[in-house]
Image (cartoon, coloured by chain):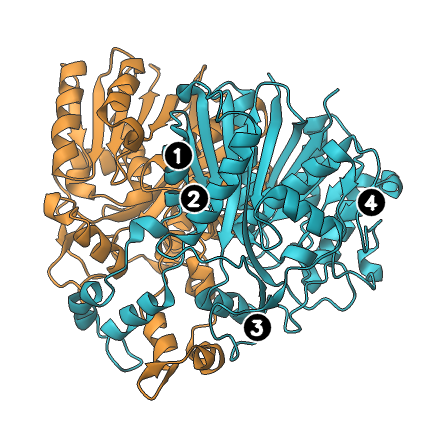
Chain colours: A cyan, B orange
Amino acid sequence: MRAAWVNAVGAVTPLGSCWRETRDALAAGRCAIGSIRSFDASGFPSRHAAAVDRDFSGEDRRTALALEAAREAWAAAGLDRQPPNPLKVGVFVGAESGRLPFSTVAALARAGGPGPVLDHARFSREAVSRARDLDSRLVSPAAVAARLVGELGARGPVATVSLACASGAAAIAEAARAVRQGECDVALAGGVGADVDPLMLAGFGLLGALSASGVSRPFDRRRDGFVLGEGAGMVVLSCEKGIARVAGIGRTLDAWSLTAPAPDGNGGLRAMRLALADAGLQSVDVVQAHGTSTPLNDAIEARAIRDALGDSLRSSHVSSIKGALGHTIAAAGALGFIAAVEAVVTGTVLPTVGLAEPDPDCALPHVVGRAVSRRVDSAMVNSFAFGGANCTLVVTRPE
Amino acid sequence: MSAPVAIVGAGAVSAFGIGWRGLGRAVAAGDLQPRESALLRDSHPGTLASEVGEIPTALDAGNARARKLMSRAARLAAIAMREALVAAGFDERREEIGAWMGVGASGIAMEDVPAIVSASFVDGGLSLHRLGDQGLLACNPLFTFQTLNNFSLCHGAILEGLGGPNAAFFSRGSGTAVALAEAVHALRAGECDRAIAGGADTALHPVTWAELQRDGFSAQGLLPGEGAAVLALAREASPALGLLESCTAVAGAQEGAAAVFRELERLPPRADLVVIAPWGTPPRAWLGDMAASRYSGAAVVDVSLRLGDSLAATPALAWVAALDLLRPGERAVVLTAGVDGDLTAAVFRKESP
């Protein structure tokens, strides 16, 4: 089976309109989290987010973010100048549903009548006329991939992975598999999340998953939940030797709970072991952790990382970019993957912003404060989802 | 795909009921008649649909508490997954079993949205401040569980203890074929020895049906349906219910009919049975014509006439219908055309005894 190589990356985040800007800000320890300004969040239990300070009016926010990240990666790979055979270009996107403007949601709800009980008949009569800007095709999970396919003129395999927080990593895993098995020679893959939205803030708030303090502190003893973020990360994979290799893929299900990782961390641990075995490795130099800043996830993930890497962990570094970028949900795994590629290519291990007082239960060789420079031959990325889906990827330096 | 993969079990929920045996024959015989939808009775009275009837408690997914967390698609998926796993005898080492599903955009219970919004109005206007404060209190705290698309996979996986490689693909048809193809790739690559793959969805959510109406699909003959179907797969097994020779999805929106025709040229030249599942009248005409011209002499069964279009579930229901109709020594080609303009093609064979 042939190798799947990373040829280029692209990202749009609250810290930068391209990966280089984002990387520099992350390396300097900057944090993108602030008060939500795009709507009145003063009544919500959590009022902070890491939002991209851009107005994409008239366009689905996910699609706009993904498109910019994709163009950056595509151009960085030189494919805008030398387009590949369209029939051998695949597109793999991790995405959930887009968000309707809240004015539309409110209009839809009003169509159901003034009271707390929905008047179904009235709803069916009035919904369409009240919600004139409703176009479900634009907010479909598949809309992002469809737009990217059109942009690149791709004619190969297309897939939209909707795997919640693991969507981006799982999309890269699918793309790597397709390249390895020759279904396509070039793949654009990644994820996008744009969930800084009243209903998502309400939904995740109801789960008790969001930080009341509004601070993302992965692995810190003061952590109290995650902070919503948004952004897009895209990579170009191909069968041609590139800057790093997708060496290992591990995917598992916890089969435990909809919201909480299995207490023994077995699902994540198995994903890491499978990815390491796929890469033919027993250790890695860097771990880009899922590290959401929730009390449960971080402690269980830390233990699973220790179990997976054993004594070799002493010579590794572990970090989570969610301290600076918040949790970008469907983009999280892709942005984590790009951070891992950065480590392998430049030796820059990005720090865990917000981590100042490591929780003893999360004892790991953390990167605190600023980036660490070192030789990195291999890096592992964890991405764990609500619902219990786990995806771990391993990237390595070209031999 | 190269060598075929063995189908060792199947499960389904549809208007036919729970189970897949007899489904294909009932469809072919015209026994299933669309009826007025109970799910759409309040919002769209008089809508004819292919709707899952009352589910016996003993055969339902999980317990009452678990079902409150489920979208309808997740509930149907869990039922079909259990049936497929039991039929396959996949009783042990379930943490190693892979699971791939085509899933739709799960819709929350309609009652939840106005409850939130009504509690969020101040002086006749919507207040986001009040939404974040009082609106949350009025909301079903479990509604988030119904909205994440991957939960149509994860509910069933949790109930059944599945722990292997996995993915949920958004689907209005083609993503379900991608799910099946990925399961086969994983089996071939040794990522797992056993897997399930399928799709689950409903077109009978008031918002979904309103969208399909607005986009003109209902006017072009789309019969709304719902259901779930799952195949249990093994790298090798004997005896098997059938063999899966190939499964592909073609994003028709990219190249239109050209891609579809090119894909058809790759299909085997001989088939005894062609099962088609077009979303409505226009694809029914060209899919039926293509099936008849390429496979003259083969029986052609249109499952959508009876099962309707159930979006992510459509291909999977067509697969199990084909399995039900296949006789030993025969080959079936299953072609579906979804509302996104995508085509899927799967080829099944049943070995002679």
Task: Point out the residue furthest to the bottom here.
Answer: B123
Q: Are marks 3 and 1 in contact (CB under 8 Å)?
A: no
Residue at point 21%, 21% (across, down) = B273
Q: Quadrant of residue B353?
A: top left
Q: Amino acid at mark 2?
A: Met
Q: Nearer the viewer, residue A399 or A268?
A: A399
In the rendered image, which residue does mark 3 sit on? A47
Query: Where is B287 relative to B21, above or below?
Result: above
Residue at point 64%, 23% (across, down) = A242
In the rendered image, which residue does mark 4 sit on? A372
**Helix, strand or loop for disc 2:** helix
Marks 2 and 1 share the same chain = no
- As measured in the structure, the alpha-carbon distance from the residue carrying label 3 to the one carrying label 1 is 36 Å
What is the crowding at mark 3: few (fewer than 14 residues within 10 Å), some, or many (at least 20)?
Answer: many
In the rendered image, which residue does mark 1 sit on? A151
Mark 4 / mark 3, whichever is N-terminal: 3
